[in-house]
Amino acid sequence: MPGFPGPFGRTVSKQPDRLFAQPLAQVPDFAFNEDVVRVFPDMIKRSVPGYPTIVENIGVLAGKFAQPHSVLYDLGASLGAVTQALRRHVQLEDCRVIAVDNSAAMVERCREYLHAQDAMFQELLPVEVIEADILALPLQPCSLVALNFTLQFIRPEQRLALLSRIREALLPGGALILSEKLRFEDAEQHALLGELHIAFKRANGYSELEIAQKRSAIEKVMLPDSLEQHRERLLAAGFSQVVPWFQCLNFASMIALP
Ligand SMILES: C[S@@+](CC[C@H](N)C(=O)[O-])C[C@H]1O[C@@H](n2cnc3c(N)ncnc32)[C@H](O)[C@@H]1O
Ligand SMILES: O=C(O)C(=O)C[C@]1(C(=O)O)C=C[C@@H](O)C=C1
């Protein structure tokens, strides 16, 4: 389905997310397949509190950390929302964006959206979209890395090695921007923010059935950590400082400095 020009010149699919609206005999594990790709812009906006603010401001933050003659990575790029924000905010000599995702369906549609952005604006940073597993991809020296709601889909035992490789690839003065759904170590706080997240989904038009079926689809494939776990792991990976810059309910984003 062709897209239409969205806010900030972004081209987005208009299809509403009704993937979990009908009762399913068995709810399959969530995967970034063709069906999800078709509704993804609607799904992520209605499911992640603060998502549009986070995406746009990653572009703003990149304005501080991005350096000429370097690469900016968007790892787990999906449809390239972060890549598009980077290209709206960063104009530097000999700088380029590399967007990576291991879902063929995402990569195909991401390339279409970025071509549409190229057709609408001049002098955007060059971009390359790679279909690859970020756990296996060698990283070039880079000044900015975005992991926007991607790390939570990586198996927990593989997270430290990935962050260590990112830390090694980052140039002095660069940064990793890490956005994640959070778990809370205090049980009451965890329950409260979980309930409020459900209220957010309800307010965005999801039914109780949709909320319940989506939850059982993602519970084995998306495993959130607490802010404390993120901080400790980032320090163990060699980052010197972790600065949370955004939180809305149980979703947060941090800047990790090399
Ligand atoms: C929640 S989405 C990310 C959203 C996106 N960053 C944005 O801001 O719109 C997670 C993405 O990570 C990708 N992904 C998960 N594991 C991956 C891996 N090992 N290598 C590359 N991409 C991966 C998925 O295919 C999916 O597109
Ligand atoms: O926590 C949830 O219920 C979500 O739907 C979150 C989340 C995410 O954080 O990536 C999960 C899968 C979809 O990609 C969109 C949103």
Image (cartoon, rainbow, N blue to C red):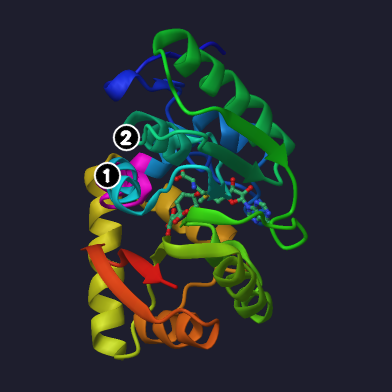
Q: Position of residue 207 (x, y in %)?
A: 35, 45
The reply to whether the residue tagged 2 has its Cβ within 8 angstroms of ligand 1 is: no
Identify which residue is drawn at 58% across, 66% down. 166
Q: Quadrant of the N terminus?
A: top right
Q: Earlier in the sequence, mark 1 or mark 2?
A: 1
Using residue 92 as the reference point, say whether residue 220 is left or right of it: right
The residue depicted at 60 percent of the width and 71 percent of the height is 168
**Dot 1: what SS?**
helix
The dominant secondary structure in magenta is: helix
Q: Are marks 1 and 2 in contact (CB under 8 Å)?
A: yes
* Whether residue 17 can be seen here: no
The x, y position of residue 190, in whole percent, is: 30, 80
- Does 254 appear above or below 205? below
In space, the residues marked 1 and 2 are separated at their CA atoms by 6 Å
Residue 207 versus residue 133: which sits nearer the camera?
A: 133
- Determine if the magenta segment contains residue 51: yes
Residue 79 visible to the viewer: yes
Residue that mark 2 sits on: 89
The amino acid type found where label 1 is placed reads Val
Q: Residue at x 61, y 79 (%)?
A: 160
- Image quadrant of residue 244? bottom left
**Residue nearer the viewer, 37 or 160:** 160
Magenta stretch, residue numbers: 45-55
Q: Please state which amino acid type lies under the numbered disc 2.
A: His
Which residue corresponds to mark 1?
60
Image quarter of the C terminus: bottom left
Residue 127 shown left or right of residue 131 in the figure: left
